[in-house]
Amino acid sequence: MTPILSVAGLEKTFGSVVAARDITIDVPAEQTVGIIGANGAGKTTFVNMVTGHLRPSKGTIRFGDKDITGMASRDITRLGISRSFQVAQIFPSLTVFENMCVAAAIARDADGILRRAFTPLRSGQTVAEAEAAIELFQIGSYREARVATLPQGIRKLLDIAMAVAGWPRILLLDEPTSGISIEEKFGLMDVVMSALKSRRVTILFVEHDMEIIGRYADRVLAFYDGTIIADGPPAEALANERVQTLISGTKLRTEAAHA
Ligand SMILES: Nc1ncnc2c1ncn2[C@@H]1O[C@H](COP(=O)(O)OP(=O)(O)O)[C@@H](O)[C@H]1O
Ligand SMILES: [Mg+2]
């Protein structure tokens, strides 16, 4: 079967810095891929290239049969590869429901809705999609809360729910649990992962917490200095000797010891 995402010989340089070199991977549909690596290893650069936020210096990116290398991010999003919104893209003065309507409306008609600034965002289909997403991500009790007042975890859920409004086939999450307390992390990831799986989304997520990786990833890509040094099921990849020595000691070692 054709992989849903196929990356070959991907390279990215910033002046003399090589942020990605010869990244080659195939991702089958509906796989959940955890991306690990120390700060500066090239994880975000990789995510940005796949989503079109950065143009690769070399190599190709295919989404199914389609070559998307160098395409604009909004065109890639429209094809079906999404990423979580940055916090800045949530409207703090609007409620959860209103934010969700904006995302659902934009997802359906990116050009039109922005041009027709006064087009009502509450058409039947928009409302139905917004309500469904709010329920799926279990944020209904915050439906009328202004986003500025939300706890961090709920804000993250809204962020990801908005990224899923256009029914993407692939979703990339760059450190979805950053800023979330250890006690809240698993609850958050349970909601996120079951929501995404129910929509059969292929997931690539960057994560530093190896317990989270072990629990939710089917496969781990370990980045080091712009290359992938291990690629396999979590138990195997996390036990890899280079992964153990090169990807920040303490967290990994303590958590691998629990596994
Ligand atoms: N826009 C940029 N300009 C210059 N260097 C960059 C830029 N983005 C990333 N880098 C460099 O590329 C390398 C990889 O960065 P990044 O992909 O952000 O790593 P990670 O997400 O794994 O922490 C780092 O050395 C970083 O300094
Ligand atoms: Mg990063």
Image (cartoon, grey):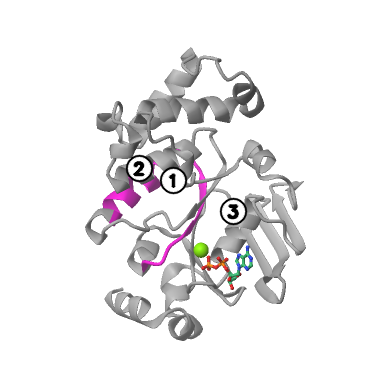
Give, as a three-letter code, the residue at label 3. Pro
Q: Residues under labels 2 and 3: Cα distance?
A: 30 Å
Q: CA distance from mark 1 to mark 2?
A: 8 Å
Q: Residues within 10 Å of mark 2 (few under 14, many from 20)?
A: some
Upstream in sequence: badge 1 or badge 3:
3
Label 1 crowd bin: few (<14), some (14–19), many (20+), radius 10 Å: few
Query: Quick check: 49 above or below 249?
Result: above
Mark 1 vs 2: CB contact within 8 A? yes
Dot in front, 1 or 3: 1
Q: Which mark, by number, is residue 155?
A: 2
Residue 229 figure quarter: bottom right
Does mark 2 have its CB less than 8 Å from ligand 2? no
| Kind of residue indicated by mark 2 | Arg
The residue beneath circle 3 is 28
Horizontal placement of 93 versus 120: left or right?
left
Q: Residues within 10 Å of mark 3 (few under 14, many from 20)?
A: some
What residue is rendered at 34% in x and 30% in y?
135
Classify 250 as above or below 207: below
User: Which is nearer the N-term, disc 2 or disc 3?
Assistant: 3
Which residues fall within the magenta stretch?
Answer: 185-209
Q: CA distance from mark 1 to mark 3?
A: 29 Å
Count of numbered circles in the view: 3
Q: Is residue 189 magenta?
A: yes
SS at badge 1: helix
Residue beneath the point at 72% across and 60% down: 56
Q: Which residue carries the number 1 mark?
A: 87
Compared with 51, 95 (above or below) is above
